[in-house]
Amino acid sequence: MITVAQLRDFLVKGCSLVTILIYLLIAALLVAAAVVGAVESIQLLKAAAAMPTQETLTAALQSILLIIVIATLIDMVRSYVTFGRVLVRPILIAGITTMVRRLLVASPSFLDVIGITIVILGLTVAMIYLGREDRTVTKFLSGEKDAANIENEAAKAGEPESASK
């Protein structure tokens, strides 16, 4: 006879497996997109070298920044598959890169530049504070250190104690 606890554990493991398989599929698609983007970037860089205008250089830069965003998303998927948790830092890096890409590639008005700059600053501050927690969680989940050592290191570095929990 199957108990309720065994059934619950089976369902949790099944759902976790399905989620990991979905993330692996997403990772494969992102890698394919990165390869296509890299080929396009090389072609755009060749065109920019042959005729260095603002348009060709902007297109090459936009393509390179898109590859950075894709690589960051791949890192996010890797962290989920490895640790079973989506880390905040890769998402914030992708957001900052996207905002910089928008700032450089588009022709924003003065108010748009101010708004984008505020968003970049906000994402940067969030990355600094939430990135500490991600590093702590990563160290703990990888078995590199135990919770007590991580809390001691956080206290020595002046980090709030809540960031290590």
Image (tube, rainbow, N blue to C red):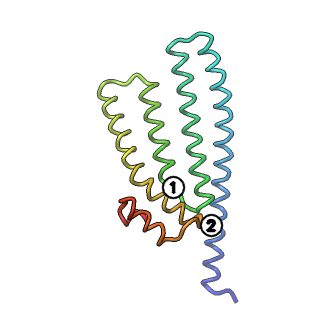
Instruction: Measure the alpha-carbon separation of dots 2 and 1.
Output: 20 Å
Vertical comparison of 71 with 137: above or below:
above
Q: Amino acid at mark 2?
A: Cys
Q: Farthest residue toward the front?
A: 156
Q: Position of residue 28 (x, y in %)?
A: 68, 46
Single out the residue that lies furthest toward the top.
51
**Rendering coords of residue 2 (x, y %):** 68, 86
Could you say which is closer to the camera, residue 118 or residue 3?
A: 118
User: From the viewer's perspective, is 31 left or right of 116?
Assistant: right
Q: Is residue 144 visible in the rendered structure shown here?
A: yes
Which corner quadrant holds the C terminus?
bottom left
Residue 142: name its quadrant: bottom right
Residue found at the very far bottom of the displayed protein: 1
Q: Is residue 76 left or right of residue 155?
A: right
Contact, mark 2 vs mark 1 (Cβ under 8 Å):
no
Residue 51, compared with residue 57, is above or below; it is above
Q: Position of residue 138 (x, y in %)?
A: 54, 60
Q: Quadrant of residue 5?
A: bottom right
**Residue 87: image tag:** 1
Q: Residue at x 49, y 71 (%)?
A: 147
Helix, strand or loop under label 1: loop
Residue, disc 2: 15
Tell me residue 23's x, y (percent).
Answer: 63, 54
